[in-house]
């Protein structure tokens, strides 16, 4: 397995330098925009909560833990049950045993697998909400597609949901995306909560949990959709990763 990881890293770095040299991908015109100044409306407690409880991942494969901690604390606060000491990432790993989450965060992973593919992330999110008694209408795992026959409907549904999150605070959206499609980083699967959407400009705001990312950033909807509909490199399939997508929590 170490040989596979070595080959994977080599391929990722080659792709990174190709985009850098050719000014394509995240090195091209559709790059992310850092959002240094943001005004949060008091009318959207869900959005404000996500910003307030945003935390960074504790190692390179723990983006799922930081993301779920942010979501759990936000919803506990919105529902008036946030403890004096918010739920920590360690609390989550100790209490949520679904899919061997804690083991997946260890140095060797669970059966050699680290991080959470999209479907497994959905299981972990739903269990986390149940463990902490958070009321919600449902959790939907959406594997996005670039198939011309299906993508139009998928995009329209996502746009509607982003608008609902922004204007009605009726949901939370967790993105499972190719980080290198949005930032000048390696093209690896990554997880972070969506922190906002501007219906007028069509820009999606991400609260990236990566420790190397200093600020929230926004990208146009088309770029965001491409990132979450990425078919991850074939070598990632050995670790259970297929396509990206998003988790939709209906409140």
Image (tube, rainbow, N blue to C red):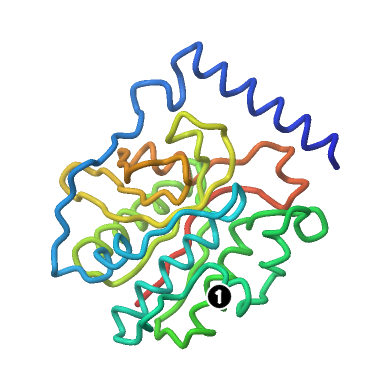
Q: How many marks?
A: 1
- With 47 as the anchor, is 172 left or right in this view? right
| Left or right: 59 in relation to 249 | right
Report the quarter where the C terminus lies. bottom left
Vertical placement of residue 80 versus 236, above or below: below
- In the picture, the quarter occupied by the N terminus is top right
Q: Where is residue 145 in the image (x, y as percent from the top left)?
A: 51, 47
**Seen from this angle, which residue lies furthest top?**
21
Classify 10 Å Cα crowding around label 1: few (below 14), some (14-19), many (20 and above). few
Depth order, front residue of 185/227: 185
The answer to whether residue 199 is above or below residue 81 is above
The x, y position of residue 199, in whole percent, is 19, 50
Q: Is residue 158 left or right of residue 132?
A: left
Q: Mark 1 points at which residue?
A: 91
Image vertical order of residue 53 relative to residue 229, above or below: below
User: Considering the numbered disc 1 on the image, is that residue within a helix, a strand or a loop?
Assistant: helix
- Residue shown at the point (69%, 26%) measured from the top left: 11
> At which x and y percent is residue 17?
57, 18
- Residue at 56%, 32% (x, y): give it: 186
State whether residue 147 appears in this view: no
Q: Which residue is drawn at 18% across and 44% down?
A: 37
Q: In which quarter of the image is residue 2?
A: top right
Query: Is there any visible trace of residue 64 in the rendered image?
Result: yes
Q: Is residue 135 left or right of residue 140?
A: left
Where residue 27 appears, x then y in whole percent? 42, 22
The residue shown at (29%, 79%) is 78
């Amino acid at each position: 397995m170490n040989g596979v990881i070595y080959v994977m890293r080599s391929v990722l770095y080659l792709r990174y330098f190709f985009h850098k040299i050719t000014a394509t991908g995240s090195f091209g015109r559709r790059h992310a925009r850092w959002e240094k100044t943001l005004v949060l409306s008091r009318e959207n407690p869900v959005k404000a909560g996500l910003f307030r409880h945003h935390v960074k991942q504790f190692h390179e494969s723990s983006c799922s833990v930081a993301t779920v901690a942010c979501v759990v604390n936000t919803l506990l606060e919105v529902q008036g049950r946030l403890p004096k000491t918010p739920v920590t990432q360690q609390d989550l790993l100790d209490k949520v045993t679904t899919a061997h989450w804690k083991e997946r965060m260890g140095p060797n992973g669970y059966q050699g697998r680290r991080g959470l593919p999209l479907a497994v992330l959905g299981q972990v999110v739903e269990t986390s909400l149940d463990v902490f008694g958070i009321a919600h209408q449902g959790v939907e795992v959406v594997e996005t597609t670039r198939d011309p026959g299906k993508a139009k409907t998928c995009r329209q549904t996502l746009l509607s949901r982003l608008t609902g999150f922004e204007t009605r605070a009726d949901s939370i959206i967790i993105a499972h995306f190719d980080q290198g499609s949005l930032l000048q980083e390696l093209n690896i699967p990554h997880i972070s909560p969506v922190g906002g959407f501007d219906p007028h400009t069509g820009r999606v705001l991400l609260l990236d949990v990566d420790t190397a990312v200093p600020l929230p950033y926004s990208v146009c909807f088309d770029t965001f959709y491409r990132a979450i509909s990425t078919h991850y490199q074939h070598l990632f399939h050995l670790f259970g990763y297929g396509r990206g997508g998003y988790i939709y929590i209906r409140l």
